[in-house]
Amino acid sequence: MRLDDDLEAILAATPDDPLIERAYDAYRGLRLVRDPPFASLVSFICSAQMRVGRIHEMQVSLAERYGESVAFDGETYRAFPTAERLAAASEADLRELSLGYRAPYVERTAEMVADGEAHPGQARDLAYEAARESLTRFVGVGRKVADCVLLFSLGHLQAVPLDTWIRTAIEEHYPDCERGSYEETSRAIRERFGGDYAGYAQTYVFNWLRNNG
């Protein structure tokens, strides 16, 4: 959790906009997460065409099957699997956990990390668009998944994943930001949401539309 983020400064840097203001008023205090890069990458690869509940079930299944036991406060939990553990699983094994067509993507991505071929954390210190391009090296990762990992793991707070809810926001509230391609539409909505902290505005608008819109 990004408890060190100065939310008041972020809000002050956000453009005056009726939708964003309603979202901030409704969910003031909401913060972005700072998830581990590999776990975040695999989770968002699994998120394609899936509702939140099923994505959560996939992550729990992966942890229960391949994660190490962790004791905390008298309870035992399963950590998210390491790349090495997932790389050792077969596609068939992963399909048994209901990953479907995502199974080979997870398998190959885990192999890339375990073998040292690539690591999502390498995108942390790159400029934003270069970081997004870097993440698309992984199998099953397009620009939207890359933006999710950049925002929720790697500290690129300007990232705005163009998911269903944000595309709805563009259609209904910011139609001039629709530019016909992911790259250009992404650039336009990032500018509308305030640039450097656009990902925060995205997160608040996402929650507002999903729960109140």
Image (cartoon, grey):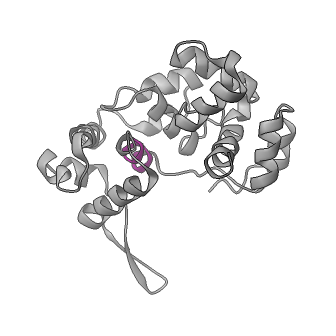
46 up-or-down from 58: above or below = above
Q: Residue at x 36, y 57 (%)?
A: 59
- Taking depth in this image into account, of 49 and 160 the one nearest to the observer is 49
Check residue 176 for magenta coloring: no
Q: Quadrant of residue 170?
A: top right
- Left or right, 186 with respect to 41, comes to right
Q: Quadrant of residue 173?
A: top right
111 up-or-down from 32: above or below = above
Residue 15, can we see it? yes
Where residue 204 sits: x, y (%)? Answer: 70, 45
Where residue 203 sits: x, y (%)? Answer: 65, 43
Q: What's the magenta bit mostly, secondary-structure-wise?
A: helix
Magenta stretch: give its range: 38-44
Q: Quadrant of the N terminus?
A: bottom right
Q: Residue at x 35, y 26 (%)?
A: 137
Q: Residue at x 54, y 17 (%)?
A: 183
Where residue 104 sits: x, y (%)? Answer: 21, 39
Where residue 205 sits: x, y (%)? Answer: 69, 41
